[in-house]
Image (cartoon, grey):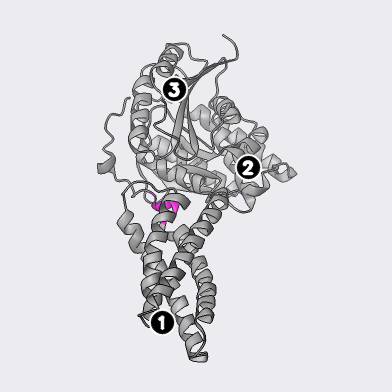
């Protein structure tokens, strides 16, 4: 077997139709024949039913000596959007480096094969990366709102390790080792050459490099159940992590943690770069529509009432269009809530435009209709800025993409141990 063997899935018909960015989920495995098939089928089924973006699941077998590679190849042949890769040497970091470094996806992610993390957290993990809000995203078992079931030994070791990271290396993220992470592909590819570890410290090193280079790390509280069949040598892994921390401390003191991250990752977020033109185009159309409606209603309505009615009709259409085309929300779910919250943004914008028109009328009560329309255009531009900020930061914020999961809703059904 060569160092790297890659088996693509039968991709024909893998996706119902293109739906936004491509997400690649890597699952590193070593001697996991007992759980691999059930976990991949469960993950694939869940994503097909609930996930709004295109995806591919890549099983990365790193030097298994059981039937893991045989099962992975069978899954790749049987299930659309599942691929398999074989590495001749062990190491979770090595496996992720191979997948992430060559991925054609827009966002790359990984999760542990036992699926200990509740899958309801996956969309909240991905959403801030797709929108451009964040550069990396991690599941956290130590954040407020998480629900964790594991033994006291692993709990103490995990908390002690993350406390050490915060005290010695000034880390600001709460959980370095949860097997549930994602990142924007261009950012991850920029960081990978600077990551030295090939095993379990890979995650921590990647996150430390990201923080030191000014990147944004989004944390998602997760529900997590420890796998009692896990064969990870916790003490050996903890020792290797301590050695990794010492190495990173030396790099920090020598100033060797700078990475040439893509400039656009630090400037205007990728999501905003696509959202602003879409919002602007929709805004132009809705503004023109509102001006036309205002001119028609002004034939038989007073100035303030004509503005309110025309603005309301345009705002409903504007919110619906931005929901679909600017922020990528499809389907009827929460459409009413989005309209109601968009209505709050509408009211603030309406207040600005109405107050402005009232001021114009007070200063020039006999101003020609063209002056009214020109003033309305300028006021609508101000209102548009207010609406965009509220839609992006509140109505369609990534953290509100999915209702917070609960243990009862997740059910923890179908977990294979």
Q: Is residue 96 visible?
A: yes
Q: Report which residue position mark 1 lands on.
A: 303
Q: Earlier in the sequence, mark 3 or mark 1?
A: 3
Question: How many neighbours does mark 2 have within 10 angstroms: few (below 14), some (14-19), or many (20 or more)?
Answer: many
What's the distance in space between the residues labelled 3 and 1, CA to CA?
Answer: 58 Å
Q: Name the residue nearer the viewer: 384 or 373.
A: 373
What's the distance in space between the residues labelled 3 and 2, CA to CA?
Answer: 38 Å
- Residue 343 drawn above or below residue 25: below
Q: Earlier in the sequence, mark 2 or mark 1?
A: 2
Marks 2 & 1, CB-CB < 8 Å contact: no
Measured from the top left, where is residue 135 in percent x and y? 56, 45
Q: Nearer the viewer, mark 3 or mark 2?
A: 3
Quadrant including the C terminus: top left
Q: Report which residue position mark 3 lands on.
A: 12
Task: Tell which residue pokes out farthest to the top in this image.
Answer: 1
Q: Earlier in the sequence, mark 3 or mark 2?
A: 3
């Amino acid at each position: 077997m060569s160092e790297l063997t890659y088996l693509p899935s039968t991709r024909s018909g893998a996706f119902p139709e293109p739906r936004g960015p491509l997400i690649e989920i890597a699952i590193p495995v070593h001697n996991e024949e007992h759980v691999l098939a059930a976990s991949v089928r469960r993950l694939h089924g869940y994503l097909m039913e609930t996930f709004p973006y295109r995806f591919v699941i890549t099983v990365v077998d790193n030097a298994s000596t059981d039937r893991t590679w045989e099962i992975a190849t069978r899954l790749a042949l049987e299930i659309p959007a599942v691929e398999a890769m074989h590495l001749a040497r062990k190491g979770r970091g090595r496996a992720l480096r191979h997948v992430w470094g060559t991925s054609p996806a827009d966002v790359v992610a990984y999760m542990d094969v036992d699926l200990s993390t509740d899958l309801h957290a996956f969309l909240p993990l991905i959403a801030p990366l797709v929108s451009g809000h964040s550069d990396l995203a991690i599941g956290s078992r130590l954040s407020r709102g998480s629900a964790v079931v594991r033994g006291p030994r692993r709990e103490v070791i995990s908390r002690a390790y993350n406390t050490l990271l915060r005290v010695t290396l000034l880390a600001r993220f709460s959980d370095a080792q949860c097997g549930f992470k994602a990142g924007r592909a261009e950012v991850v590819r920029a960081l990978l050459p600077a990551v030295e570890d090939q095993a379990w410290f890979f995650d921590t090193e990647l996150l430390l490099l990201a923080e030191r280079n000014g990147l944004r790390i989004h944390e998602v509280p997760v529900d997590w159940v420890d796998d009692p069949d896990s064969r990870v040598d916790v003490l050996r892994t903890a020792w290797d992590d301590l050695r990794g921390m010492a190495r990173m401390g030396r790099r920090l003191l020598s100033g060797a943690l700078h990475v040439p991250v893509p400039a656009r990752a630090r400037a205007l977020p990728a999501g905003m770069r696509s959202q602003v033109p879409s919002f602007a185009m929709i805004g132009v159309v809705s503004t023109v529509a509102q001006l036309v409606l205002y001119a028609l209603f002004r034939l038989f309505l007073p100035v303030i009432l004509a503005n309110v009615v025309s603005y309301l009709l345009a705002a409903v259409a504007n919110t619906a269009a931005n929901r679909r085309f600017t922020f990528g929300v499809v389907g009827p779910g929460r459409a009413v809530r989005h309209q109601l919250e968009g209505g709050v943004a509408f009211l603030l914008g309406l207040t600005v435009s109405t107050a402005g028109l009232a001021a114009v009328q007070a200063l020039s009560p006999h101003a020609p209709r063209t002056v009214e329309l020109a003033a309305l255009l300028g006021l609508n531009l101000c209102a548009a800025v207010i609406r965009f900020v509220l839609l992006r930061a509140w109505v369609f914020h990534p953290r509100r993409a999915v209702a917070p999961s609960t243990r009862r809703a997740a059910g923890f059904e179908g977990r294979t141990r």
